[in-house]
Image (cartoon, rainbow, N blue to C red):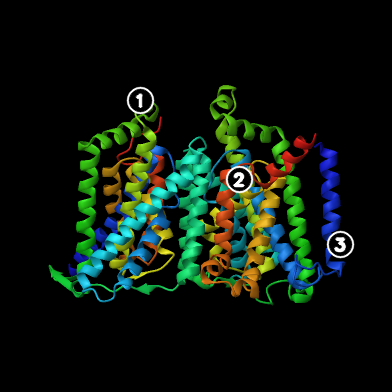
Amino acid sequence: MSTLVLLLVTGLGLGALYFLVAAGLSLIWGLMRVLNFAHGAFFTVAGYAGYFAAAALPGLPPWPSWFLAALAGTLAGGLFATLTEIGLIRPLYRRPVGQVLVTVGLALATLALVEGAFGSDPRVVSLPGWMTATTTILGAAIPNTRFVVLLLALVVLGGLLFFLQRTRYGLIVRAGVENRDMVSALGIDVQRAFTLVFTIGGLAAGLAGVLGATYYGTIDPSRGTAMLISAFIVVVIGGMGSIGGSALAAVIVALVQQFLNFYAAAGTGDFAVVLLLAVVLLVRPGGLMGRPPA
Amino acid sequence: MNRRTVAAALALLGLLALALPFVHVTVPGLFEGPLDSAGTLNLLGLCFVFGALALTYDIVFGFTGLLSFGHALYFATGVYVTAIALVRWHWSLPQSLALTAVVALVLPLALGAVCLRVRDIPFAMVTLAFAEAASILVLQNPYGLTGGEEGLALGGSVLPAALVGVANTAHLYWIAAGLLLATCAIGWWAVHSPPGRVWQAIRENERRVAVLGLNPFAYKLASFTLSGFLASAAGVAYLLLQGGANPQITTANFTLVLLVMVVLGGVGTLWGAVVGGIVYEYLDFRLVEFSNTAGVQNLPPVLRVPLSEPLFILGVLFIVLVLFLPDGLGGLIRRIPTRSR
């Protein structure tokens, strides 16, 4: 029973990370039809930004230091994403394949640069004492970081849903996902919404980068790529452009991975998730909560 | 270009390439050792393999318009199936090659039939997913077959003596050169055949092809399978040249690198892709040596770190190409005569 609870909560924490990366990818795809391969790079850069922000102020007590790292990482992810959109995506609005290709190039170059500058070995992040401790629930000793990750992801989910459902810009984004041409025909500047969506996606991926460091206790250059692939799977299973779908699929994917990796051989879960993706695409090409493609 | 000029050009290039192991000339700056040294021949052989591989990718991506993110899987099929048959089951080389040929034909046919039920980006995702699944499988080392992260070394005894040892690098080089020539010939023939013209029509407008009474699915599957099969052939040559299998070539990153190669050379031109593959592999190899030169090592870290990462230089080069030179190197060269005329 305690193993079950531990796997469940740890899986939910992992799902929270997937959701944070996938939410931005999903919105970017839904509105802009750009498959953003650089999203994993946002994650990685944010993780390192957080690490160095904390290291830059060694005298700070643990908690403020952690908050500073989280803030710095999130902002770094957002800034990186904004610059990417303005510098690389915007010149290619008329060439969709070109947009995918530049994000591929950016992902490869960033990964190589991070590896060259900081090495490929994992670095251990310093966490407040409470986060390295565990809390016992139903007999299972659960690392406290899982709750932090889960809580913050829920806050982001709530914030995103509020933004999309209750604000004017959210309305434009939702309308753009439905029919981009109609929105621009009504005289609304869709390009601004593009930049906004990219920034939001970058902020979420940045937060995921810092929380990933908190969740695993280490950062390394290659985790962003693994996150990106999982997030792709989540986005497609959930339905491209649907935030709720991403949240649901993130939980499903993470739980399937956790349970199968534990109860069957290691790696079986990752394998099963890929098969799940293939099945979902063939049975429901639009994903769980997306619409079937026209 | 008509058939005769292509055949003549291929034959000339082929003769030049075949004669290289007998040319004891040092090309300063371009290669470390003389042209007939084992190191240079091995590098050139790898360049040829990647040229051939880029061409196979160009058949699906450039000519048929299918953005597959799983091409690494078919290359890895050639590498791993042959390696497993040779090392784990102690089959002879011809037997192993026969098995690889069967798998290399059946696998893209079966997976293509599934993947091609969706198109565009979902297609890209499903192909990526299958390749990723294969990558995980290789890393997991089922029944001790694939060797997991360490890969699978061929060792001396599993291959015929003529293919083993530094002294016989020329033989491997010839295999790679032959592979490239054969892939070029088959690729050229395929895209100029009637089905090849339908592939290009599908790339331009799939619905119209369907309206004309042709079944796009069958043509796309043929393109996917041919490309996958040829990629596996390139994988076999790679295995022989490297003397083993390593899991890096199964990853999604490797497919992205292939994409870079094809775009580098020019999408939708066969020789452009070949040049892209050769140039990429050459740069990737030489940039590592470049980064170890005293000139780079003495630079301040701000410059030294980026310059010692080949993938960084290539990634930036790729971005610049996509932004400013969408037709790749091939497009640049093609543009010169039109201007001077």
**Label 1: which secondary element:** loop
Residue at the image point whose x is 20% and y is 37% from the top: A166
Could you say where residue B202 lies in the image, as x and y percent from the top left? 59, 32
Question: Where A200 falls versus A54 (above or below)?
Answer: above
Any part of residue B107 in sight:
no
Q: Which badge, 2 or 3, is on the more N-terminal residue?
A: 3
Could you say where residue A53 lies in the image, as x and y percent from the top left? 32, 67
Q: Which mark is residue B225?
A: 2
Could you say where residue B246 lies in the image, as x and y percent from the top left? 57, 67
Which chain's residue wears label 2? B
- Amino acid at pointer 1: Gly
Closer to the observer: label 1 or label 2?
1
Residue at the image point whose x is 65% and y is 41% from the top: B268
Q: Quick one: A123 or A80, which is closer to the camera? A: A80
Residue at the image point whose x is 32% and y is 60% from the top: A73
Question: Where A280 falls versus A251 (above or below)?
Answer: above
Question: Where B215 falls versus A278 (above or below)?
Answer: above
Q: Which mark is residue A187?
A: 1
| Whether labels 1 and 2 share one chain | no
Using a 10 Å C-alpha cutoff, classify the residue at mark 2 as few (fewer than 14 neighbours), some (14 to 19) or many (20 or more): many
Q: Quick one: A199 or A159, which is closer to the camera? A: A199
Which residue is tagged 3? Answer: B19
